[in-house]
Image: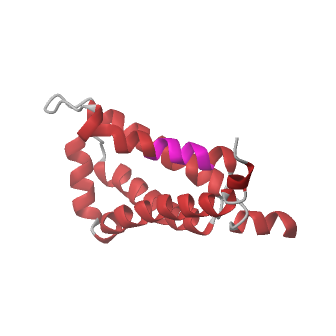
Amino acid sequence: MIPYLFIWSGIILFVLRVFFGALFVIHGWPKIKDLAQNAKNFESMGFRPGLFWGTIVALLEFFGGLAIIFGFFTQIFGLLLAIQIIIVAIWRTRSKHKRHKFVGGYELDVALVLIGLILATMGGGIYAVDNLLQFIF
């Protein structure tokens, strides 16, 4: 064990949280901008009705990503985003048209699920809005 590295845990958790949230904001924004196309994409993946499921995912990714960046309801959004990735990834890998492998396939999905679960279990850290709110309420 290297105790000196524990000093950096708050900063690293902050960087991880911002990275994770930014990925979802970046992927959620195009979905929000064109909900009709997003609905078609979700229909083609087998999510019916596509408009309903596509809109839920778009809103969760964009606004959940923003919340994660700021550390606002980090545990809730970390868990919701991890669940969303699991559902979409499992659904996508069930596709009969493509064979998905771990490398070059779903390894990023697994990494994102794990980051979401880390945030769900550890919270946003010292540099999160959640941390400030616990002193107010």
| Snapshot quadrant of residue 106 | top left
Residue at x 69% of width, y 67% of height: 127
Relative side of 76 to 101, left or right: right
Query: How is the protein colored in the picture?
Result: secondary structure
**Residue nearest the observer in this picture, 18 or 48:** 18
Q: Looking at the image, which is closer to me, 7 or 134?
A: 7
Give the image location of residue 105, x and y in percent: 26, 39
Q: Quadrant of the N terminus?
A: top right
Q: Quadrant of the C terminus?
A: bottom right
Q: Is residue 55 above or below residue 101?
A: below
Residue sitting at x 27%, y 68%: 34
For the stretch drawn in magenta, the main secondary structure is helix
The answer to whether residue 137 of the structure is visible from this angle is no
Residue 40 location (% of width, % of height)? 21, 53
Q: Quadrant of residue 54?
A: bottom left
107 within the magenta span: no
* Magenta-span inclusion, residue 117: yes
Give the side of residue 87 with respect to residue 10, left or right. Answer: left
Residue 9: x %, y % from top left: 67, 56
Q: Give coordinates of residue 27: x percent, y percent.
A: 35, 61
Q: Quadrant of residue 131?
A: bottom right
Q: Which residues, given as a range, are shown in magenta?
A: 112-119
> Residue at (51%, 41%) from the top-left corner?
114
Against 49, residue 33 (above or below) is below
Residue at 56% from the left image edge and 60% from the top image edge: 17
Image height check: is 34 above or below 104?
below
- Whether residue 136 can be seen here: yes
Query: How many numbered markers are drawn?
Result: 0
